[in-house]
């Protein structure tokens, strides 16, 4: 997922806000930072998909970014 400059800033701000509200960030299963996630989403030719994890009250507790693969069938 190659992002334009404004999209990068928006993603970083959203991730920073999630952290400020108590959510943990993960990239490929390891705890991460907004900067590292933005860097990977921008610099790699792979696509990443976020998974938003909520607690039983509906509060965001984790955001997990994992590489996605496309399969030819």
Image: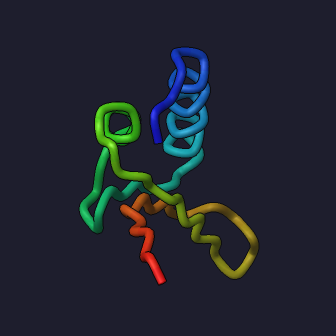
Residue 45 appears at what percent x and percent y? Answer: 33, 43
Instruction: Pick the residue in front: 45 or 24.
Output: 45
Residue 23, above or below 59:
above
Look at the image and name its color scheme. Answer: rainbow
Residue 41, above or below 65:
above
Residue 18 appears at what percent x and percent y? Answer: 57, 45
Is 26 on the left-hand or right-hand side of 54?
Answer: left
Q: Report the residue at 32% width, 56% height from top.
A: 27
Residue 19 appears at what percent x and percent y? Answer: 49, 44
Residue 16, above or below 67:
above
* Corner quadrant of residue 31: bottom left
Q: Report the residue at 44% width, 55% height from top.
A: 48
Is 59 on the left-hand or right-hand side of 67?
Answer: right
Residue furthest to the front: 73
* Corner quadrant of residue 51: bottom right
Residue furthest to the top: 5
Instruction: Pick the residue in front: 28 or 73.
Output: 73
Residue furthest to the left: 30
Across the whole image, how many numbered discs are drawn on residues?
0
* Corner quadrant of residue 37: top left
Q: Report the residue at 63% width, 75% height from top.
A: 55
Residue 54 appears at what percent x and percent y? Answer: 64, 71
Is 32 on the left-hand or right-hand side of 47?
Answer: left
Residue 26, above or below 16:
below
Q: Report the residue at 48% width, 84% height from top.
A: 73
């Amino acid at each position: 997922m190659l992002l334009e400059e404004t999209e990068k800033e928006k993603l970083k701000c959203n991730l920073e806000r999630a952290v400020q509200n108590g959510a943990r960030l993960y990239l490929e299963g390891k705890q991460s930072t907004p900067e590292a996630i933005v860097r990977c989403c921008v610099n790699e030719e792979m696509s990443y998909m976020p998974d938003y994890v909520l607690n039983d009250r509906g509060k965001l507790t984790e955001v997990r970014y994992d590489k996605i693969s496309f399969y030819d069938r």
